[in-house]
Amino acid sequence: MEFLFVSRVRIKLLQYFFSNPEVPIHLRAAVREIKEEINAVRRELVRMEEFKLLTIDVRGNRKYYALNPGGPFLDELRGIVLKTFGLGGDIIRNLNKLGEVHFAILTGSYTSSTNAHMTHPLDLVLIGNVDLPELTSIVAEHEKRSEKEVNYTVFSLADFNLRKRRKDAFVGELLLAPKVMLVGTQEQLLT
């Protein structure tokens, strides 16, 4: 991600806003949250607002910044951030340890910018011949860092395809729901 965005502060702010899409933050709280200098944080917040990635809500003498749900390239940026950092980044970095993963999918509140209840658990689906102890270890480490529960489901490829042919409700919902594909493509998942 650093090669795409040259500002370390911008990267940290993107991580914060995509991890907390419904939580507005003021300048000093952002400085505390991402542990960077106030002038650098102020400069990046202004740039992100000018680009329409953030909205501003003035309350008293404070400006509160929040992710703009109608911002340009929001879905694309969300995908990049979720595939690089957090649980998505952990899964991608550890693919060789997880066995034969045909599909890895982030779904639900983890990918939503309009989630009103940030206490919902994150969702992860892996399809393939997955090393469950290794996956459990990766998820446990993420839960410890993020202080958020992760609900995950693992299917063998044969079981997933059988459920898809039988029009299983869970699989149907998975196919139609918004998601970020970490491994595989939406087109491959549907065929």
Image (tube, helix red, strand yellow):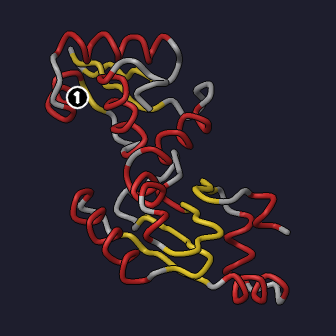
Name the residue located 53 percent from the left edge and 39 percent from the top edge. 80
Taking the view exactly as shown, the residue that stands out farthest to the front is 96
Q: Where on the picture, by quarter, is residue 155?
A: bottom right
Q: Where on the picture, by quarter, is residue 156?
A: bottom right
* Residue 8 spot, x, y in % from top left: 31, 24
Quarter of the image for the C terminus: give it.
Answer: bottom right
* Residue 21 spot, x, y in % from top left: 42, 42
Name the residue located 40 percent from the left edge and 20 percent from the top edge. 56
Q: Where on the picture, by quarter, is residue 164?
A: bottom right
Q: Which residue is mark 1?
A: 30
* Residue 138 spot, x, y in % from top left: 34, 68
Q: How many marks?
A: 1
Establish if 183 lies above or below 29.
below
The amino acid pointed to by label 1 is: Ala
Is residue 31 toward the left or the right of residue 66 in the image? left
Name the residue located 24 percent from the left edge and 13 percent from the top edge. 40
Is residue 182 toward the left or the right of residue 90 in the image? right
